[in-house]
C-alpha cells in the first residue's frame, strides 16, 4: 500500500464525527475507529458510497495499547494530518468508573499520543459537552491537576475517586471539564509541532442516541432544555461540523487550546434564564 495521502483519524463512529470527517476528508485517507467494529463499518459504508476513501478499525480508547495500535495502522498509509475524537459514553449508558475511564482518561491518552505524531501544521478537535460548563467553578489547583497530571495518574486524583463523585452525571461533567483543561495543556505541546488542538462542547444534537434519550424516561428533561434555550430547538451534527471545519482548516490557524460551546444558548439560560435551577 503506497503512502501518498494525508490521513484523518476519527475515533467514535457517530453522526457528529462523520459530519466533521465528510467536511474535511476530500482527497485524504480516513480511518474510522470505534469500540464496536460494526459501528465503524456502518459509517465507512455511508462514506464510501459518497466517494470517500475510508477504512474501519476497532479501538478501545480506554486502552493505551489499543490507541497505539490505531496510530500504527494510520502511519502505515500516510501522515496523520487531522485527528477527530468523537468517542465517549453518556451518563445514561455507563457507570461512574466507565465514564471516567473512557471519557476522561481515554480522551487524555488520545490527546497525548496523537500530539506526538500529528503532522507538522496538523490539527485536531475533540468533542466535549455542554455538561462541563454547568458545574460550578473548580479551584485553580484542581484545574491545574486536571490539565497537567501525568495521564496514568489522572484517575488517582482525589477529586476523581468514585467516592467523591455523586453520580454518573457528575462523573460526566468532571470528564468534560477535564477534556477542556487537557486540551489547553496539550495545545502547548502540540504547538511544538506547529500543530493545533481545540475542543467543542455541543448541547443537544440530534443523533440516534439523542433521539433515544428524548423519547426515553428523561425525555421531558431534554425537551424542556431546548424549549427554554434561546434557539428553542436542538442542533444537528452539521452545525457542529461548521465550527469543526473552521478549527481544523487553515482558516483557524490562530485558534488553539480553546473550547467552543455550541448549545443554542442552553447554558446561558441555565445561568441567567428560565433554565436556572430552583434554589433550596
Image (cartoon, rainbow, N blue to C red):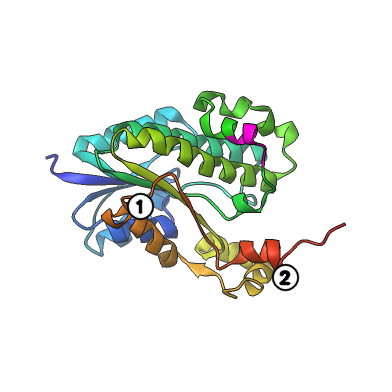
Residue sitting nearer the eye, 206 or 259: 259
User: Overall secondary structure of the magenta stretch?
Assistant: helix
x and y percentages locating residue 180 in the rendered image: 52, 44
Which residue is identified by label 2? 274
Residue sitting nearer the eye, 207 or 107: 107
Residue at the image position 59 percent from the left and 30 percent from the top: 145
- Local SS, label 1: helix
Residue at the image position 31 percent from the left and 41 percent from the top: 195
x and y percentages locating residue 147 in the rendered image: 53, 34
Q: Magenta segment, which residues? A: 138-143
Left or right of 43? Residue 29 is: left
Relative to 170, say whether 45 is above or below: below
Residue sitting nearer the eye, 156 or 17: 156
Relative to 6, say whether 239 is above or below: below
Left or right of 149? Residue 74 is: left
Label 2 neighbour load within 10 Å: few <14, some 14-19, many 20+? some
Dot label at residue 41: 1
Q: Quadrant of residue 51?
A: bottom left
Disc 1 from disc 2: Cα separation: 42 Å
Residue at the image position 62 percent from the left and 46 percent from the top: 172
Residue sitting nearer the eye, 152 or 275: 275
Q: Quadrant of residue 276?
A: bottom right
Residue at the image position 32 percent from the left and 34 percent from the top: 71
- Local SS, label 2: loop
Q: Classify the position of the N terminus by image quarter.
A: top left
Q: Is residue 267 visible?
A: yes
Q: Quadrant of residue 98?
A: top right
Q: Nearer the viewer, mark 1 or mark 2?
A: 2
Amino acid at each position: 500500500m503506497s503512502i501518498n495521502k494525508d490521513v484523518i483519524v476519527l475515533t467514535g463512529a457517530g453522526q457528529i464525527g462523520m459530519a466533521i470527517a465528510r467536511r474535511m476528508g476530500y482527497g485524504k485517507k480516513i480511518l474510522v475507529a470505534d469500540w464496536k467494529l460494526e459501528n465503524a463499518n456502518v459509517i465507512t459504508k455511508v462514506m464510501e458510497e459518497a466517494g470517500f476513501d475510508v477504512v474501519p478499525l476497532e479501538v478501545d480508547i480506554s486502552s493505551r495499547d489499543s490507541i497505539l495500535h490505531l496510530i500504527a495502522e494510520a502511519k502505515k498509509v500516510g501522515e496523520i494530518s487531522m485527528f477527530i475524537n468523537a468517542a465517549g459514553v453518556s451518563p445514561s449508558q455507563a457507570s461512574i468508573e466507565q465514564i471516567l475511564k473512557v471519557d476522561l482518561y481515554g480522551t487524555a491518552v488520545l490527546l497525548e499520543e496523537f500530539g506526538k505524531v500529528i503532522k507538522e501544521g496538523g490539527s485536531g478537535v475533540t468533542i466535549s459537552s455542554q455538561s462541563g460548563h454547568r458545574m460550578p467553578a473548580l479551584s485553580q489547583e484542581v484545574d491545574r491537576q486536571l490539565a497537567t497530571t501525568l495521564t496514568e495518574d489522572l484517575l488517582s486524583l482525589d477529586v476523581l475517586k468514585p467516592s467523591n463523585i455523586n453520580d454518573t452525571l457528575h462523573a460526566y461533567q468532571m470528564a468534560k471539564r477535564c477534556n477542556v483543561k487537557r486540551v489547553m495543556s496539550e495545545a502547548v505541546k502540540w504547538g511544538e509541532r506547529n500543530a493545533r488542538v481545540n475542543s467543542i462542547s455541543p448541547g443537544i444534537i440530534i443523533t440516534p442516541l439523542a433521539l433515544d434519550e428524548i423519547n426515553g424516561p428523561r425525555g421531558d428533561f431534554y425537551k424542556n432544555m431546548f424549549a427554554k434555550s434561546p434557539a428553542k430547538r436542538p442542533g444537528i451534527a452539521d452545525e457542529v461540523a461548521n465550527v469543526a471545519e473552521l478549527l481544523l482548516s487553515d482558516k483557524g490557524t490562530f485558534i488553539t487550546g480553546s473550547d467552543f460551546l455550541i448549545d443554542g444558548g442552553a447554558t446561558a439560560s441555565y445561568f441567567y434564564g428560565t433554565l436556572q435551577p430552583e434554589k433550596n
